[in-house]
Each structure stands twice: as C-alpha cells, then as structure tokens.
Amino acid sequence: MLKMKKIILPLIFFLLTLQIALAGTVTRSFSASTILPGSSLTVSLVVNVDEVANEQLYSIEEKVPTGFTITDPGTGSYSGNTIRWFISTAVDITHTYTVSAPATEGAYEFYGTYMFGDDPSTSVILGSTTVNVGPECTEGSTRSCGSCSSGTQTCSLGVWGTCIGAINLNTDSNNCGSCGNSCLTTHTTTCTNAVCNVCELNYWDINGDGTGSDADGCEYACTQTGNIEICDDGVDNNCDGQINEGCLPIQTTDKCPAPAGFQYDIPSRVRTEVGGVLQYCDPLTLTLLDTKSVGSLCNNDYECEANICAEGACTELVKKIEEEIGLLKKIYCWILHPLDSVARDTCLIS
C-alpha cells in the first residue's frame, strides 16, 4: 500500500501541473506607457487558447484604476470600473477597450483575472500593469530617434514631437539596409529598397554578381574611353574586363611565309603565282590569298586579278580604258556644243 501511494501522489501532482501548463493565457498591453491627463488610452487583452487542453469557454474580469473613465468597453460589458467578458466559444482573439486618464498625475495599476473551462480557479492577467499619467518629457528637451538614432524629437506640451531628420534605411546610401552599411564600400552610389545599386563612375560589375548585400558590388575599376577596343594599345577601352578582344595578333613581320617550292617569304601586298593561281600577300593576316575576279569587292589594286580596284570593285583594264575614253568624249562634246543639246547628243553618238 505504501508503494502504491508513492506512485499515485506524484502522478496526481503531475496531472495537476500538466493541466496548469496546458491552460490558455490572457496578456495585457497598453497603447502607451505614459499619457497626459485627460488623454485616451487603449488597452489590449490578447487571448491565447490552448487547443490541446480543448478549452471551450473562458471569462475575463478587468478592473480599471480609480480615476480612469471607461469610454469604450469594446465587446465587454462594464459596471463602474469593471469590464467583463464571458466567451462560450474559445478562440485566439484580442479584446480592446478604451479609457480616459484622470486629471491627477501619477502611476496607476491595472488589475484583472481570467479563467478557462470549468476550472473555478482564476489567474492574474499577464503583461503590462502600470500606466503613468503625466508629461512624457520635460518641455523643450530633445532626444535621438529614428533609424540609427539619426533623428531628433523635441518635447512640446509634455509629449515628444515628430522625429525630424531620421535617415531612411531603404534609400540612404551611407546606411543602406542597416546602420553603417555604406554603398561606397562596394563602389555603388544608390540605395533602393535597402539594397546598394548603380555603379560609381569608373567602376563596373564585371563578375555579374549584382550589387546586393551578398555581392562584391562594382569591383572593377576602369575608365571607359570608348565602346570599341583600340587594337594593340594594351588598354581595356570598353571596360568589359578584356583587353584588345576581337583584335588580330600583333604581327612581328610584314611577309607571308614562303609557300612550297619558294625559297623566300613573300612581302605584304606583293602578288605572285603559286601552283598556277595568282595570289597576293594580305598585310592584315600575312597569308597568301587568291586574287579577286572582276566585280568583287576590293580595297586595293593588288587584290584584283587585273590589278585595278576602282570605286570599291575589281575592274578589267579594257573596261577601265573605255570608261575613261567615254568621259573624255563627254567633256569634248560639251566644249563644242555648250548650248545646243541636239548637236551635243549627235556628237556623243558619232
């Protein structure tokens, strides 16, 4: 029997403790901890129901300090300085009520109790209990306010005024997203939505990791001199992280390698016959290329089979001579008949 008691008594104690642990709670908070005499105060009672305990109902009794006037009981019913709630369907909810402060300054204590389910025992409401009635501050005094304590508030008529001059962590480039996070450390100039962006002049985000908080920002220092690379100057002209990209390698000779059967290299721009095909040494690539036929685009005479490049195209010698003779004939007929178009046309076809 003694052994049975030793087992049953701790078990009963455990069950009672478990019931208490499973009980819901009611917690109080105030809209302000200090209010001026006669001003309004909102009181919130946050109800947290323990679903495990299967609580179906609860009641709250809140006592307002003497001197305070209940101006709005919310969903509760009140008599004198007491507000009561009796809820038959327990759910998580916040009850609020409004009171008006007394004229007498001082500290005032709020007190209330609650109970859940059929348990007749009550618990004291948790949270804040004291409200000070009186001025928040000394007239004319100041204090820091806002993000990173960058703003200033001034006391006027017993209350703190608007915070003036506080920085905005979403837009301040010296405190972007958090105090002291300067965008300049990543060579960015603008803070948008608490993220540094827009590269500083002459800095570039070459690795493409962006300018966010986990990136190294605009890590590449470069002064742009143009959008196109200048070959062989050893400078990254377009600031893309590459130097002289797209340029042909620097040539150390101005000759094309001697083709099979030749004893010497072929100088650039020189034409020669290789295996029965007329070729020329291209000065840009220093390779032998086939000469171009009539009508092909060209830049130099040596590129063409007839060795004549006229108006950007390879031309035959005979055709070139005919064009020049035709031009001379037009000049001659104009000189003979400057005013007579019929005679001039006859001259041209004769």
Image (cartoon, helix red, strand yellow):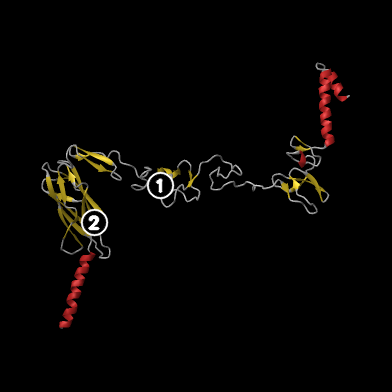
For the point 82% across and 31% down, the residue is 323
Q: Amino acid at mark 1?
A: Thr
Q: CA distance from mark 2 to mark 1?
A: 48 Å
Q: Is residue 24 visible?
A: yes
For the point 43% across and 44% down, the residue is 188
Residue 23 tag number: none
Q: Of the residues under marks 2 and 1, which one precedes in the sequence?
A: 2
Q: Is disc 2 in contact with disc 1, using a CB cutoff of under 8 Å?
A: no
Which residue sits furthest right?
A: 350
Q: Position of residue 24 (x, y in %)?
A: 23, 61
Q: Report the residue marked by disc 2.
A: 47
Asked whether, in this view, residue 307 is left or right of residue 204, the answer is right
Asked whether, in this view, residue 250 is left or right of residue 255, the answer is left
Q: Report the residue marked by disc 1.
A: 185
Q: Amino acid at mark 2?
A: Val
Q: Position of residue 115 (x, y in %)?
A: 18, 60
Q: Position of residue 52 (x, y in %)?
A: 27, 65
For the point 17% across and 37% down, the residue is 139
* Mark 2 closeness class: few <14, some 14–19, many ≥20 residues within 10 Å: many
Q: Is residue 71 visible?
A: no
**Quadrant in the rendering for residue 331:** top right
Q: Name the foreground residue: 249 vs 25.
A: 249
Which residue sits furthest front?
A: 263
User: Secondary structure beneath disc 2?
Assistant: strand
Q: Name the foreground residue: 279 vs 28.
A: 279
Asked whether, in this view, residue 103 is left or right of residue 257, the answer is left
Q: Name the foreground residue: 288 vs 6.
A: 288
Name the quarter where the C terminus is drawn.
top right
User: Secondary structure beneath disc 1?
Assistant: helix
Q: Name the foreground residue: 189 vs 154.
A: 189
Closer to the eye: label 2 or 1: 1
Q: Position of residue 134 (x, y in %)?
A: 14, 42
